[in-house]
Image (spheres, rainbow, N blue to C red):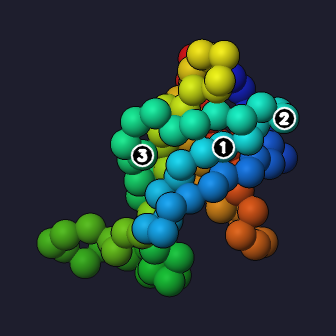
Amino acid sequence: MVPIDAQHPEPVRVTTDNAGEPRRIVWRARRFQVTDTPTALVGTADWWRPFDPYTFGVGHPPLCIAGWRFQATSDDGETHVFDVRHAAEDDDWVLLRTFD
């Protein structure tokens, strides 16, 4: 796993399909093509966070897609698994972690 600085996540460029699933990523000036089915990373919905400390019994808090995990391969065959999410400020993407 490549360590990522959580305080300053690394920006990446992600291209998605019409459904919003990643298809390509540019990381450290290298292009990678997604080579498996992306998996949605889910987290508690932002609108629920003020209620988060309270438990209401049955079920779990409402969830939303918080990012994506996918395998991608460069033209020369280098392959990694990437975890990405949208940057908090805009529609840019940031890298959360990579796995070799």
Dot 1, crowdedness within 10 Å: few (<14), some or many (≥20)? many
- Which residue in the structure is indicated by mark 2? 29
Residue 56 lies left or right of residue 93; in this view the side is: left
Instruction: Identify residue for label 3.
Output: 38
Mark 3 and mark 2 lie on one chain; the one further toward the N terminus is: 2
Q: Separation of disc 1 and disc 2 at Cα?
A: 10 Å
Helix, strand or loop status at disc 1 = strand
Residue pictured at 56% horizontal, 41% vertical: 83
Q: Give SS at disc 2.
A: loop
The disc labelled 1 sits on which kind of residue? Answer: Ile
Q: Position of 8 compared to 40: left or right?
A: right
Residue 26 percent across, percent down from the top left: 73, 41
Picture quadrant of residue 80: top right
Residue indicated by mark 1: 25
Q: CA distance from mark 1 to mark 3?
A: 12 Å
Can residue 7 be seen?
Answer: no
